[in-house]
Image: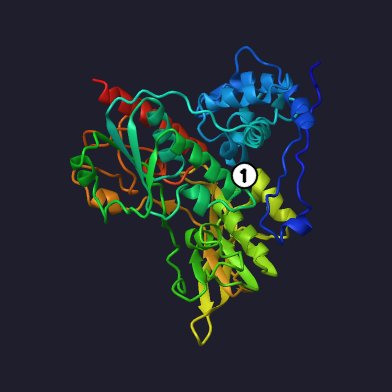
Amino acid sequence: MANMSMIKVPMPEQDPCVRNKNFLEVATGYTEDMAVEEAKRCLNCKTRPCMSGCPVNVKIPEFIGLIAERDFEGAYKKIKETNALPAVCGRVCPQESQCEGKCVRGVKGESVAIGRLERFAADWHRTHFEDEIPPIIKNGKKVAVIGAGPSGLTCAGDLAKLGYEVTVFEAFHSAGGVLVYGIPEFRLPKAIVKHEIEGLKKLGVDIKTNMVIGKILSVDDIMDIGYEAVYIASGAGLPMFMGIEGEDLVGVYSANEFLTRINLMKAYLDEYDTPIKRSKSIAIVGGGNVAMDAARCAKRLGAEHVYIIYRRSMDEMPARGEEVHHAFEEGIEFKILTNPTKIIGDENGLVSALECVKMELGEPDASGRRRPNPVEGSEFTLEVDSVIMALGTSPNPLIRTTTKGIEANKRGCLVVDDNLQTTKDGVYAGGDAVTGAATVILAMGAGKKAAESIHEYLSK
């Protein structure tokens, strides 16, 4: 019998006053009965509007229908037909603006909890089955992928299934990209990322770490040693700053550095000797998901006061509603319509305060959001001992500046055609390296498209 409840089955979570002191996963996941109950809310629409919002074309009504029938393994296999990383996507995708945003049930109530059900199916499979390795006939052709993040891993997996010998070159000492250095353990446990990567290795994907392409090898070098095509999925890891006075003081971090020290280098664990400042009072400048991640990490590291400094209102804040909600619950303090003007240091060159000005919203700017303007005479000072800049990132120029024939636009993003081929023959690019900082699932969608384009290119 269909479940006509207007609201989703609630997701079990740790208590906010407990979880803001640990790095364990916030949401603990559906039980089997909860998943079945939620799956029965799906109307199995003939037009499948939810699928139009999925960048990797997961067969959503079909996998949800299988969960409703308690065929949990069948649901997992249905997701895996098009999604290489379901346990990841079920946790970090912005479903509310993608698949769930198109759900008919959302017109008069809450949409079906597609992300929670995807997570459930992936977690159920992981605890009950070993991954099955399909028979693969090798075609003798080699493809290189630069970057072991979600886009590169997706492309590598799809190409491996088609019979290509795929090598992934990763700059860090661990594969996963933003999944391991950017997204905190309490949102995405690293054991889950490792499990997904091990599944790709079983397909024959060779992952070489500590390989900084542009330093150790160039793209041209890679093609000279026998790789017939290259996919650049190096992400957007170059942090942005405001250019205000005091950004060179000790205690000012980019969000990338702060999160990498915590997530990839395990600074939150006593047994790891990773240097990081444990602040008493800290300001995070920005309003996106990365800002929320940094703020919530800082709270867990013991900060008494954690401020989100955002120059627009809550309505314009780009972070996911779920992440903002969790941050509020965990005691993060929001200073909206506020903009920093100067970082103040003490006699030792350490951060001691942040000068700010209040803002008011005017007419919409090029982004479509109302432009923030400073309010005269509203300046104030916030006492902090650290500042984190979470203002976005752009692609690192290393690869394009060491490879002839690859063009970039004025934002430093690689220029590609409709098939994701760059201006250099045989070299493709996608994900954040092309779009600038975006979502995991959009990067994965680019990886799938690149695999299709490379296969077509090498099949001629």
**Picture layout, residue 229 above or below residue 64:** below
Q: Residues within 10 Å of mark 1 (few under 14, many from 20)?
A: some
**Picture layout, residue 343 above or below residue 190:** below
* Residue in front for this viewpoint, 247 or 423: 423
Q: How is the image coloured?
A: rainbow
Q: Position of residue 25 (x, y in %)?
A: 68, 50
**Picture layout, residue 375 above or below residue 111:** below
Quarter of image, res 404:
top left
**Picture layout, residue 385 above or below residue 364:** below
Q: How many marks?
A: 1
Q: Look at the image and tell me whether residue 160 can be seen.
A: yes
Q: Position of residue 452 (x, y in %)?
A: 36, 25
Secondary structure, mark 1, is loop
Kind of residue at badge 1: Arg
> Which quadrant of the rendered structure holds the C terminus?
top left
* Residue in front for this viewpoint, 448 or 123: 123
* Residue in front for this viewpoint, 451 or 243: 451
Relative to 93, is 423 on the left or the right? Answer: left
Relative to 377, is 69 on the left or the right? Answer: right
What residue is drawn where x is 57% and y is 68%? 356
Q: Look at the image and tell me whether residue 378 can be seen.
A: no
What residue is drawn where x is 62% and y is 18%? 62
What residue is drawn where x is 61% and y is 54%? 292
Which residue is tagged 1? 320
> Which quadrant of the rendered structure holds the N terminus?
top right
Q: Position of residue 212 (x, y in %)?
A: 32, 54
Q: Position of residue 201 (x, y in %)?
A: 44, 38
Quarter of image, res 32:
top right
**Residue placed farthest to the bottom in the image?**
347
Quarter of image, res 154:
top left
